[in-house]
Amino acid sequence: MTVTIVGSQLGDEGKGGVVDIYGDAVDVVARYQGGDNAGHTVVHDGTKYKLSLVPSGAIRGKVGVLGNGCVVNPETLFDEIDTLRERGLDPDVRVAERAHVILPYHRALDGIEEDEKADLAAGTTKRGIGPTYEDKAGRRGVRIGDLLEPDVLRERLEYVVPQKKALAEEVFGKETGEEFDVEHLFETYREYGERLAEEGMTVDCGTYLQERIDAGDNVMLEGAQGTSIDIDHGIYPYVTSSNPTAGGASVGSGLGPTVVGQGDVIGIVKAYLSRVGTGPLPTELGGVDGQTPDYDATTGAGGDAEELATYIRDEGGEYGTVTGRPRRVGWLDMPMLRHAARANGFTGLAINHIDVLAGLEEVKVGHSYRLDGEETLTMPPTTEAWGRCEATLKTFEGWSDVDWTAVAAEGYDAIPEAARTYLEYIADELETPIYAVGVGPGREETVIVEDPYE
Ligand code: IMP
């Protein structure tokens, strides 16, 4: 039995919290794409843990797997594991031998290319994610399994590193250091390989997961980032380099699509929008650092929008977990969600952060877009067209702040009526039932309507 958790917007929808609430029944949590660009904060026994690679379930005694669709920076992996051990935890983390390795030159090139791209820059986390997936597709990547075989590792590095060095020095005119030095890389990454082997961390991911399922265990497949920054279904080129969408759960874990499709696919929705990184955002409110985007007055942009954006940003703690950058915020975007519901085939929704909007007199939603004079209900396929979309807003009555912990304990009907109207509008539009509603950041602050493992 699998349950797949997918971000339906731009990442940071609160997937970790949902993994957590359904986590008690879960034995194995596997990530299927992305790398250490996926910041998540987990609170366990009163201690806060900031992780960017290790699946949050590993803190709670579950096996955490990094699937073959992930890109793994061994330095981050071991730093996170060592920090958890220093704090008295003993995380059980497995890594797919087919997963690709992020090497120091990938990180260096990520930074160099972002600077070079100027207006086309995606605002990446500069963790080397894109350059590593590029090398995967270019068949010049280094995989986790290669770290276990020194001869293979050396052969791969000897082929690829001179190319990367030439790219940095001759194309981009940069000075290079040990991150482009074959001997240094070979020694460092061979040692990582030895540690992976000593600790018995590497797995044939699909086989491992299937065996656990056959033995009756529950597996959760956890997507990182979100549908609108998916490399195929997102707002290219302002996207990440992998597939957060549900199809990625199969390809990136080694489980067949029919296995994944037998279980639920839960879309995680934030009750408003937030994003780090660049690109258009039709329902954006205000801007960060005075960069107010030029919206149609009907969207409410202007001084008030700026204030509203700051309010939501601060109430929702909308600052990047990995980078600390203030996130851009906007109203919920229904065309974006309709696109996500179709691309992922959601069977349930978890809608988060309705408490963040509490206290606003009115809550707006981008119900549809006007694109080149036509009304449209879904996202256009090109980002340029998306940039021309003007959101047609629908206004909902706001709801007041209440004791959300008490609401979570009492259940769905205890949610303020105006908030329920908002939630039910979303569920109706997406023709998908609500499984959970997040009413606060804590573990206890979620209203559970449906448990996919029951
Ligand atoms: P990259 O994944 O670091 O290559 O960044 C590509 C784009 O994805 C940028 O716009 C990032 O800000 C965005 N991004 C990457 N990881 C996350 C995440 O975990 N949450 C939200 N946005 C992300």
Image (tube, grey):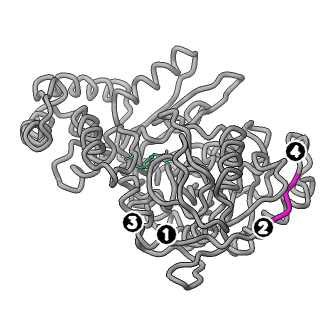
Say which quarter of the image contains residue 416.
bottom right
Q: Residue 43 appears in which quarter of the rendering?
A: top right
Q: CA distance from mark 3 to mark 2?
A: 32 Å
Q: Amino acid at mark 3?
A: Asp
| SS class, disc 4 | loop
Query: CA–CA distance between discs 3 and 4?
Result: 39 Å
Residue, disc 1: 258
Instruction: Indicate the secondary structure of the residue bearing disc 2.
Output: strand
- Tell me residue 225's x, y (percent): 50, 50
Q: Label 4 near label 3: C-beta < 8 Å?
A: no
Residue underneath mark 2? 395
On whether ligand 1 comes within 8 Å of the CB at mark 4, the answer is no
Image quarter hosting the C terminus: bottom right
What is the x, y in percent for residue 421?
Answer: 84, 66
Q: Which residue is mark 3?
A: 232
Q: Tell which circle, 4 or 2, labels the residue nearer the N-terminal end.
A: 2
Helix, strand or loop status at disc 3: loop
Pick the residue in front: 112 or 426.
112
Q: Earlier in the sequence, mark 3 or mark 1?
A: 3
N-term-proximal mark, 1 vs 4? 1
Q: Which residue is mark 4?
A: 401
Q: Which residues are magenta?
A: 395-399
Q: Is 454 drawn above or below residue 395 in the view shown?
A: above
Mark 4, Cα crowd under 10 Å, few <14 / some 14-19 / many 20+, is: some
Q: Nearer the viewer, mark 1 or mark 2?
A: 2
Eyeballing the image, is 119 above or below 406? below
Residue count near mark 2 (Cα–Cα under 10 Å), binned few <14, some 14–19, many ≥20: few
Q: Residue at x 30, y 44 (%)?
A: 114
**First along the sequence among labels 3 and 2:** 3
